[in-house]
Image (cartoon, rainbow, N blue to C red):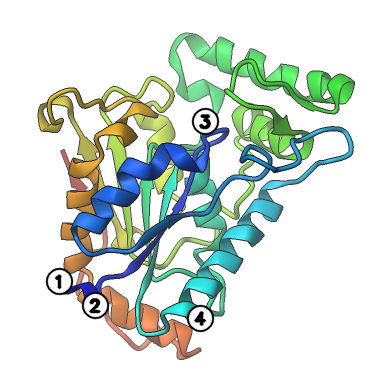
């Protein structure tokens, strides 16, 4: 793949993770000639107004930021595809914008450590997860936002309450019935203590089966000093990037469908050359 045909990668971070943390990931994509940039979470970057009782926002607000970034990328490089890489909460946002009917939708999605963290999908009946989620409306009602302990940075009241409803009721901030149609690579992390296989599968059900490839990043694929932890994988991200690059090269047929959708042409008449079930790779 030449630099001229490489897609633009927009990285949507996990909750409370600052943009600077993803510098190794941006650099790893650059080694393949893929331009990458981080669409930062609100409220945690230098100069941002942190969440408070007066400063509040929702999943939809952050999804709007991501949609705007996709449009800006298309305007800057109109001849390139746009791929979203959503990490953890960033994957939720990617699912929210993936089916946009205009140029705010990406051409492909890569998720890392994505889940629907419904408490019953966790060990010991999900007591810990349920208790944290149950505390969210109480704490945010008193403080006006979710304070730093527990997630690494303060979080806005409305977004945290939406997250808590996902944990307690399986009520997602994205429409689980409107399946993501664009090619999607879901990367699971083998040592991820925050995402169980059941929670990962619950998220993956939001993707049209014939658009989905699932890959598990295992410890034996790690470089020296690497990790398949929920967050630390970013420090040595080459295996993830190499898998994403290889996957994208196989998506030529699905990209035709994406092109047709972006031109407002029905994709019903186009038969995608893939199986009618997810591709799952151990």
**In the picture, residue 247 is in which quadrant?**
bottom left
Q: Secondary structure at mark 3?
A: loop
Q: Secondary structure at mark 4?
A: helix
Is any atom of residue 31 visible in this view? yes
Q: Where residue 37 sits: x, y (%)? A: 43, 57
Q: Earlier in the sequence, mark 3 or mark 1?
A: 1
Marks 3 and 1 in Cβ contact (< 8 Å): no
Q: Earlier in the sequence, mark 2 or mark 3?
A: 2
CA gap, disc 1 and disc 2: 7 Å
Residue displayed at 24% across by 49% down: 28
Q: Relative to residue 15, is residue 253 drawn left or right?
A: left
Marks 1 and 2 in Cβ contact (< 8 Å): yes
Query: Is 104 above or below relative to 15?
Result: below
Q: Dot 1 surroundings within 10 Å: few (below 14), some, or many (20 or more)?
A: few
Residue that carries the numbered disc 3 in the rendered image: 117
CA gap, disc 4 and disc 2: 16 Å
Residue that carries the numbered disc 1 in the rendered image: 1
Residue that carries the numbered disc 2 in the rendered image: 5
Q: Dot 4 surroundings within 10 Å: few (below 14), some, or many (20 or more)?
A: few
Residue displayed at 41% across by 79% down: 77
Q: Dot 3 surroundings within 10 Å: few (below 14), some, or many (20 or more)?
A: many
CA gap, disc 2 and disc 3: 36 Å
Query: Is 70 above or below relative to 165?
Result: below
Q: Where residue 44 sits: x, y (%)? A: 63, 37
Residue that carries the numbered disc 4 in the rendered image: 75
Q: Relative to residue 31, is residue 199 drawn left or right?
A: right
Q: Relative to residue 157, is residue 165 drawn left or right?
A: left
Is any atom of residue 279 visible in this view? no
Residue toward you, 35 or 93: 35
CA gap, disc 3 and disc 1: 36 Å
Residue displayed at 57% across by 11% down: 128
């Amino acid at each position: 793949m030449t630099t001229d045909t490489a897609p633009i990668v927009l990285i949507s971070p996990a909750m409370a993770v600052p943009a600077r943390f993803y510098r190794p990931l941006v650099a790893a994509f650059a080694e393949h000639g893929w331009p990458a940039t981080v669409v930062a979470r609100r409220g945690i970057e230098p100069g941002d107004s942190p969440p408070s009782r007066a400063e509040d926002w929702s999943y939809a607000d952050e999804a709007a930021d991501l949609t705007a970034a996709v449009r800006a990328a298309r305007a800057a490089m109109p001849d390139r595809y746009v791929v979203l890489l959503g990490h953890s909460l960033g994957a939720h946002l990617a699912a929210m914008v993936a089916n946009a009917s205009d140029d705010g939708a990406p051409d492909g999605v890569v998720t890392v450590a994505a889940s629907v963290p419904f408490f019953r999908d966790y060990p010991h009946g999900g007591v810990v997860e349920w208790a944290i989620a149950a505390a969210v409306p109480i704490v945010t009602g008193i403080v006006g936002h979710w304070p730093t302990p527990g997630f690494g940075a303060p979080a806005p009241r409305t977004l945290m309450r939406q997250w808590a409803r996902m944990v307690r009721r399986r009520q997602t901030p994205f429409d689980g019935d409107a399946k993501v149609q664009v090619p999607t690579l879901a990367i699971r992390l083998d040592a991820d203590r925050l995402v169980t296989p059941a929670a990962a599968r619950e998220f993956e059900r939001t993707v049209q089966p014939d658009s989905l490839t699932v890959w598990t990043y295992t410890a034996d694929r790690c470089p020296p000093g690497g990790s398949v932890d929920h967050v630390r994988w970013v420090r040595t991200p080459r295996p993830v990037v190499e898998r994403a690059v290889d996957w994208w090269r196989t998506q030529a047929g699905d990209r035709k469908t994406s092109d047709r959708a972006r031109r407002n042409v029905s994709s019903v008449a186009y038969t995608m050359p893939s199986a009618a079930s997810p591709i799952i790779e151990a």
